Amino acid sequence: VTDPVQEADRVATDTTTRPGEVARRSAGKPVKSERAKAETRLGWWLAGPAFVIMLLVTVYPILQALFDSLFSFRLTAPGDREFVGLGNYGVILTDPVFWYDLGITVLITIITVAVELVLGFALALVMNSAIKNLRGPLRTAILVPYGTITVVSAFAWFYAFDINTGYINNWFAWLPGISQDTAWFGSTAPALFVIIISEIWKTTPFISLLLLAGLAQVPGELTEAAKVDGATWWERMSKVILPNMKAAIMVAVLFRALDAFRIFDNIFIMTNGAYGTETLSLLAYRTSIGRLEIGMGSAVSVVLFLCVILISFIAIKGFRVDLAGRGGGR
Amino acid sequence: MSDHPVGRSRPKALVGVVVAALAAGVISGCAGDNTGTPRLTWYINPDDGGQATIAQRCTEVANGKYTINTALLPRDASAQREQLARRLAAGDKSMDIMSLDPPFVPELAEPGFLAPVPQPVIDATTSDVVDGAIAAATWKDTVVAVPFWANTQLLWYRKSVAQEAGLDMTQPVTWDQIMDVARSTDTELGVQGVRSESMTVWVNALYESQGQSIIENPGASKDEVRLGLDSPAGAEAARVIGTIGREGLGGPGLSTANENASMALFQSDRGSFMVNWPFVWPATQESQPELIEDIGWAIYPRMQADRESAPPIGGILLGVGAHSEHPDLAYEAVTCIVSVENQAYYFSSNGNPPAKKAAFDDPAVREKFPMADVIRASLDQSAPRPQTQYYNEVSTAIQQNWTPAEAVTAQTPKETQEFISAVLRGERLL
């Protein structure tokens, strides 16, 4: 598990140093020096073993899943294994369950990422402008939800809202629409509401750390100059700070979107996908682990994988365009 | 982020420690128990420690011939099934003895994951056993597992409520009668409306109580399965469940109510009737002893006044894995585990009713469970859930279509039947 603080720093450093690189590269390809070559070699030696292990533990299962997805194969009936080509994909893509689950997944992704971006930015601003000896404790405090194991936080939220054990109904009965008898996990909308806010509670710190790193990279002279020129707070924010940390925002959105798209733990604990709260990860789990339909389950997993690749592709494409624009034109 | 040498050497040292620790673990793991005594592993479902005690007892009885170690399965029945099926399919040699939920037996027996039961073991373990448990242990006319304990749901009621409504509880009652009482006394029924296995238990009991099975030809292959969901009995079952849901007779938390939630409702001021397993008796004695005087019990409610009900049956059967290295010893251990004494002990200590009828006469059992006779009668009258190697598909489809209870209509049985057929043909996702 990577340390989010380090991760945020690393990502921010990456993204802010790159514009320079782009400019350098576009200035004409310099011949590699001996030293650069040696460094490249050392880089491969250092990263190589990890790379090989990554290949073993990720590429192999991915290929296996691709292969299995072409069969009608049930774990408890190994003898009846039968090649069906793309038949499993046909069933999935024509099934309303899949499209519904995809819709729920996209809905959760969009809402959580949007809300977290706003909240995370606010928290990042607070952390950024906090006085120095308060920064450490503040960072730690904001990080606590992110440090909680998802299953544990899911149980905590579940028991808080559960109609039998929960205290939420007791506390908020004065609000319209909430009473002692509100069954949060009994229908789609309230269940999704709880799932989404627990997800937001848990991962906003992550996004705020990424944004904090981005915020720290905005040169102080720029904001000061803008201030001297008489720019208001809003103008400084929208014209100076935000454009300068666009890359950090993109990275935060990409990381969180990929994470949110694969949401599993919260839903598994709270509703187990009941009452229209199922997402693609749960569908994949239920098909291959629950039903033991390895073929169909692998096909669902492959489709989920393709969706994730698509999101990365879109985000990275958008990311590059942004960088090129900031590199001062080619 | 600095890369000074001290920072580098530390992880290396740490790696060394970890590797050494792992190696030590592996070596000690291999070297463990080299005394020659075969060690049997019993995969148990979570309980109040009864199975671990019985394992201990049988290890002592074996007197050095074998030892039994228990390994704990997940709490949730479907999670138990997932783990067992995956281990068995992978040929895990440690699957010596397994505590199996009855509906999962066909799925594991069909592909030959269970070692055949020797005839002497069948003779010793299936005599004087309640009918429902034998049915659950049998797949395609062969006994494939050994009945250990058998569970059944009773109708629990608050004497004060029944009295207030003037319902004679010495006679069998129907679902319509208890629904009427709940309406007239403004109380709630304890039923399990959560989307999980308990919903299948309820639906199946309502069908079987009308003499209709959900699967009419148990053991049939995918293409030949004949479903009995879409039937007059289905219309009645849908009416009962849908009415309880729509009129709020099951309380506001019905759509998430499992067995424990039903019990909490039953123990509250709004409690009236409840269908539930016998664990509620010791649990209520412990948590709310002042209620005990007001609690009565009867056989599961009927669907038709003139037809005996078919209460749900649960419990645990013991299976031996086909890849076990010591199947003979495992069956010897199983025979010890299911002895009348151990079953009686398990009932009186953990509240799980025995499969053997004789164990009901144990004095300790009678003292702890005054309703022992009703449980035994209920077990004999019970009907198992659909027996099929595709049980998971059937059960999940029922759970999806019959929850939330308020959405169950006259169309539900037909929709469920068509859905299950399409899923079995591989044309729909579940």
Image (cartoon, rainbow, N blue to C red):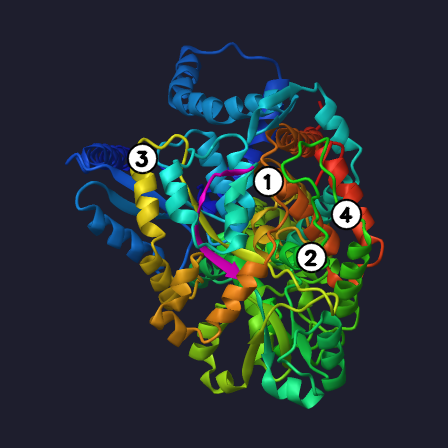
**Residue B15 as seen in the image, left or right of residue A157:** left
Q: Are tags 2 and 4 found on a single chain?
A: yes
Binning the other alpha carbons within 10 Å of mark 3 as few (below 14), some (14 to 19) or many (20 upward) gives: some
Q: Residue at x 69, y 57 (%)?
A: B203
Tell us which disc is closer to us: 1 or 4.
Answer: 4
Main secondary structure of the magenta stretch: strand
Binning the other alpha carbons within 10 Å of mark 1 as few (below 14), some (14 to 19) or many (20 upward) gives: some
Q: The disc labelled 1 sits on which kind of residue?
A: Tyr
Tell us which disc is closer to us: 3 or 1.
Answer: 3
Give the magenta range: B141-152
Mark number for residue B416? 4
Earlier-in-chain disc, 3 versus 4: 3
Q: The disc labelled 2 sits on which kind of residue?
A: Val
Tell us which disc is closer to us: 1 or 2.
Answer: 2
Residue labelled with disc 3:
B328
Residue labelled with disc 1:
A285
Q: Residue at x 20, y 35 (%)?
A: B24
How far apart are the alpha carbons under marks 3 and 1? 36 Å
Q: The disc labelled 4 sits on which kind of residue?
A: Thr
Contact? badges 1 and 2 (CB < 8 Å) = no
- Position of residue B10 measured from the top left corner of the image (x, y, whole percent): 26, 37
Does the image show residue B349?
yes
Q: What chain letter is assigned to the residue under label 2?
A: B
Q: Residue at x 54, y 86 (%)?
A: B294
Image quarter hosting the N terminus of chain A: top left
